Amino acid sequence: MSAKAITEATGKDILNRHLNQHGAGAANCRFATVNAETDWSKLSIDHPWLLTTPLVVKPDQLIKRRGKLGLVGVKKNFEEVKQWIGERLNKDQKIGNAVGKLRNFIIEPFIAHTEAEEMYVCIYSHRSADTILFYHLGGVDIGDVDAKAVKLDVKVDSTLSLADVKTTLLKAITDAPKKERIAKFIYGLYATFADLYFTYLEINPLVVTADNLYILDLAAKLDSTADFICRPKWGDIDYPPPFGRDAYPEEAYIADLDAKSGASLKLTILNRNGRIWTMVAGGGASVIYSDTICDLGGASELANYGEYSGAPSEQQTYEYAKTILNLMTSSPKHPDGKVLITGGGIANFTNVAATFQGIITALREFQPKLIEHNVSIFVRRAGPNYQEGLRRMRDFGSTLGIPLHVFGPETHMTAICGMALGKRPIPQVASVEFSTANFLLPGGQQAQADLKEANEAAGLGSADESDGLATNNHQQGQSNGANSNFNRKFFSNTTKAIVWGMQQRAVQSMLDFDFICRRDEPSVVAMVYPFTGDHKQKYYWGHKEILIPVYKKMSDAIHKHKEVDVMVNFASLRSAYDSTLEVLEFPQIRTVAIIAEGIPENMTRKLIVEANKKGVAIIGPATVGGVKPGCFKIGNTGGMLDNILHSKLYRPGSVAYVSRSGGMSNELNNIISKATDGVIEGIAIGGDRYPGSTFMDHILRYQSDPETKLLVLLGEVGGTEEYDVCAAIKDGRITKPLVAWCIGTCASMFTSEVQFGHAGSCANSDRETATAKNKALRDAGAYVPDSFDTLGELIHHVYGELVKTGRIVPREEVPPPTVPMDYSWARELGLIRKPASFMTSICDERGQELIYAGMPISEVLNKDVGIGGVISLLWFQRCLPPYVCKFFEMCLMVTADHGPAVSGAHNTIVCARAGKDLVSSVVSGLLTIGDRFGGALDGSARQFSEAYDTNLHPMEFVNKMRKEGKLILGIGHRVKSINNPDVRVKIIKEFVMENFPQCPLLKYALEVEKITTNKKPNLILNVDGVIATAFVDMLRNSGSFTSEEAQEYINVGAINSLFVLGRSIGFIGHYMDQKRLKQGLYRHPWDDISYVIPEQYN
């Protein structure tokens, strides 16, 4: 939702900070807020005026007409206010049909005034303008404001002047100075309204005294999508739930997930103890499921409204499903058990298998509780990879222990609601669609035709031939009063488009559609992506590969491709406005599709105005786009090729539709293809309050198209555009049969306001309800079903009558060409297999959280395992005991550096002084590590362990190595000796002796040291030796490894890893030290080099 109500306190706080910056000249609003946690003593200290002035107190919970309801306390002192609030705090209050608890209150100073000083001001935005209402008599008894108030429209592309305010709004104000003050206030108020992206701002009363202007009662809504613009001015905004519905922490959790995701995740809890729970994919589909449940008598038991859409990841879907299941199983059990309806339309681009895997993971986690609560689950879904998703769900259902019924696109979208509520039988075996992935299986197309003929012969889904086709009581005509931008065909089989954004999957989808439509050339000729330089991207055109240019600048793309007249804009909500304005400067562009959801309403309205000036049609924002079968499709519209083939979108039919919902447009493709000869054009105008084009714009286009025989409209609750359609039917502008349905009929059955998935789907008056609009459409002459459940049947009936009367001649089916399946998709579907190029068993970054050897990174940090713990996870795939982790960390510390003279540090320093970068310098040092420098740990471990394992006496081992002419690795030091011991060795040796359960190899090495130091005092056990032998003791005696694993780690060289990691710390230090000291290029001095050149040249 974009327009969200805020509390009176929040609204007044915003006005206090910004209103007078625009010269409004109003008094600051003094107020204090109170809830159950309020400390009254502190409150009176923070607001000392509470103790000295008469007060007004009222609840601040989006309650309308508080004065009429007796919910305002006037002229009370501080103690009386405390008593007044105490009598009402956390008490149930019924307002209309809603019952809720009063929890938040606002206290203000009482402003002494007369009724004559009370006035009314309201500003609200709509599609083409902002309307200012003013009435010179305000207050609780104002009555019908719409009838009384003076109105002034400020067009979207115009500005407000003081003269307009005075001459239009303030005619009733005769006092000149007073008029001037009020005019400046309204002027400043409107400037604040526009600047801070308010969508609604009502002040009643505005008190105008001789010396000041006071805002007493205030109601306001903000465009929440403008948060990225206005947050510095708004501050942190808390949007309260409507009165009668508590805010639940689970709702806040999902809202937070939604804010952090590119997907859409919504949750509203309607009845915490309800037995009917929903988990629906798609904004439009979620409303239709709620409608159907309510139509079937389940309104009182419907527990929640919500949706997940926009391709959430497996992890995000898991989190969403887990939240629903936790709510469902933490409420009291129901004697009839509970039902979970996991439904959805046919997805355009969401990977059904991936989202279902997240749901399955959550179901598995809650399996015992689901059984305990006697839950039945009903699933219906389709879209990309749906076959695999349904298969996984069916396979899992056989082990779940509760009923789990799974259906695909062969089942009507909302049929599972009737099954779940016992109103419809549950089929034992579901019919199977004849397709998979990107192509029909052999014989599938004919099998579908045969199945349809058999159904019609049996009387299934056929029209009642006895019913004649009603007409709209007007002759067929071509009258068209649409915007001139729409008096043309948008798309043909030669349409060329530019795509803004690096949307490779969507572009490939458009090209595949072009190919199966038998277009001669691809529809996408160029892409624009300002974050890279000009280059070319590879795509498939049927079997062969082609290159599509990508431009950094829109102007370059336009000038080099003069044939383009469509732009598909995938820019984000932050940049869609600017990128669309830019493309409107080029006259060759005639149609722009804006995909992004969440563009601020003010920006959208400006785009509409600018587009109308330039004669450009806008589809969207917040849309999947549209499709012209056989010609062109926008982005991901229509979904995967299997759905395009099923819905026969590769060739034109006779039915044109317009919908708000992008997801439901795909469902309409499916319904229309089953009920008629298919779609000729379909547009999803978008779910925002102000879509760039309206229902009427497209319906009148369809009316003018002689190839279009039947119209379908899928409207929804909120807005009044459907009434324009009613008027057009009545006055004869629409003469073709129109089947219409407005979703959201359930809204009137809820006791509190529910904002559905789309920003525009919220009724602000009875006239905007879906029920009222459906009645109006029916009364005007449209065909309106009893519910969405029967929409397909009604379309089939009307189509049948058109065929019967000869107005439609069904076209002969032409099989489409096959398109090779992408390798990646075929593999995901399990149709092919290929060995992976890499295998990994230590880390997984694919989910929502990074995982180290099975441990989420949050747990790694919360358990404070340290660097040693991370080493144990990433090197050894297990959590090793704390003493082992400490041993690792000690080894890193003692090996981190040994001065600048050793070869590794020397190399790093020389490279750093030569101007090389950090990585190059450190690598040059690391490359010196080997048996002679630092890399003796593995060799030392092998030598000592082999000697120990073969039961060689330490003396025998020393003699054997001398006889073989080999050095004992880990023995000897250039500087340290038995008389000048290495402190590092001493520290590690003592730690190991004290903490390791056993250390036989270290003790063996110490016995060898006794023998070697008798020969020469510097033949001591060095750092390499003590770490190597202690490491082997850890592997063999910690209890964490088998003997085979321990030996494998020794053989693969794991022990050297500690020295490499530790010494890297020192090398980085030397690099930074040289840069900090600004040392120049190093040149070795001549006097430190022995030149041994031959005396004579031969």
Image: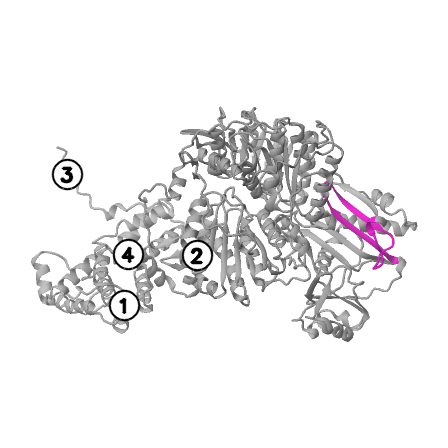
Residue 373 at x, y percent in the picture: 50, 65
The reply, left or right, for residue 717 in relation to residue 1088 is right
Residue type pointed to by label 1? Ile
Q: CA separation, marks 4 and 1?
A: 17 Å
Q: Earlier in the sequence, mark 4 or mark 1?
A: 1
Residue at image coords 48%, 50%: 427
Verify CB contact (< 8 Å) between mark 3 and mark 4: no
Q: Which mark is residue 988?
A: 1
Residue at image coords 49%, 32%: 513
Q: Earlier in the sequence, mark 3 or mark 4?
A: 4
Is residue 140 among what the camera can see? yes
Q: Look at discs 1 and 2 and give the one toward the viewer.
A: 2
Q: Earlier in the sequence, mark 3 or mark 2?
A: 2
The residue pinned by badge 3 equals 1094
- Closer-to-camera residue (886/596): 596
Residue 334 at x, y percent in the picture: 55, 66
Q: Look at discs 3 and 2 and give the one toward the viewer.
A: 2
Q: Mark 3 falls on what kind of element?
A: loop
Q: Which mark is residue 1057?
A: 4
The reply, left or right, for residue 570 in relation to residue 1088 is right
Q: Earlier in the sequence, mark 1 or mark 2?
A: 2
- Magenta-highlighted residues: 117-146
Q: Quadrant of the C terminus?
A: top left
The residue pinned by badge 2 equals 361
Residue 473 at x, y percent in the picture: 74, 33
Q: CA separation, marks 1 and 2?
A: 46 Å
Residue positioned most to the left: 963
Q: Look at discs 1 and 3 and give the one toward the viewer.
A: 1
Q: Look at discs 2 and 4 and give the one toward the viewer.
A: 2
Residue 122 at x, y percent in the picture: 78, 51
Q: Earlier in the sequence, mark 2 or mark 4?
A: 2
Residue type pointed to by label 3? Pro
